[in-house]
Image: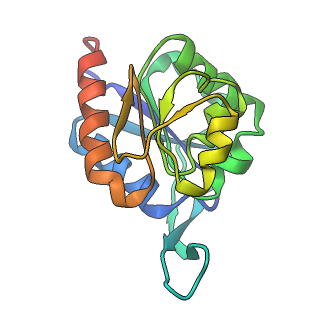
Amino acid sequence: MSQQKVLVLVGDAAEELDAMYPIYRLREGGYDAVVAGLTTREVQLVIHDFDPNSDAYTEKNGRKLPVDIAFADVDPSEYVALVIPGGRAPEYIRLDADVRRITEYFFEKDLPVGTICHGPQVPAVYGLLKGRKTAAFPPLWGDMENAGAILVDAPDVVDGNMVSCRGWPDMPEWSRAFMNVLERAAVPA
């Protein structure tokens, strides 16, 4: 029996914990976490942290993350769920036509979609969050409201098959909620 596949959309400057934590949690749960990027070149993850001497979060380079498949080569029907990590990657991968095609597929089929931190920027720009509850990194709250989303300040916001959180400090709560939604929506492999 083959493992069910979950697609993880990344790009350079994806936040390291936002990407790695769900990838490992999915693999631990028996899923095949497939990493997709603009190309199959490994991406440079970043580490965001909070510093009392900075008005914004700080950023330094993190690990390199291997990419399994290019966005253009993704057949979304092969996957049972989608995860969009945060960091700065969502602000530019959302411009890719294949990211739009992929993201819209998961929303149209009402399959599990997980967004973390800046991840909601992807479905928001396509109008997919209108009337949907979502969490997001606090500086994005105005953007989410302008996209028609109902903002919820919580670590594990579940709206149907969509699970969102504010950022990497919420990963334990987000992961539990996302795995529950994924298991509830699971179809036999």
Figure quadrant of the N terminus: top left
Q: Residue furthest bottom?
A: 53
Determine the image quadrant of residue 42: bottom right
**56 above or below 37?**
below
Determine the image quadrant of residue 175: top left
Foreground of the two, 41 or 154:
154
Residue at figure coordinates x 70%, y 49% from the top left? 91
Q: Position of residue 159 (x, y in %)?
A: 40, 25
Tell me if 160 is positioned left or right of 39 in this view.
left
Q: Position of residue 61 (x, y in %)?
A: 56, 75
Q: Position of residue 160 (x, y in %)?
A: 38, 19
**2 above or below 109?**
below
Residue at figure coordinates x 49%, y 85% from the top left? 52
Q: Is residue 72 visible?
A: no
**95 above or below 60?**
above
Foreground of the two, 118 or 132:
132
Figure quadrant of the C terminus: top left
Residue at figure coordinates x 34%, y 54% from the top left? 170
Q: Is residue 99 visible?
A: yes
Determine the image quadrant of residue 20: bottom left
Q: Position of residue 24 (x, y in %)?
A: 31, 50
Total residue callouts? 0
Q: What sort of colour scheme is used for the picture?
A: rainbow
Residue at figure coordinates x 45%, y 51% from the top left? 166
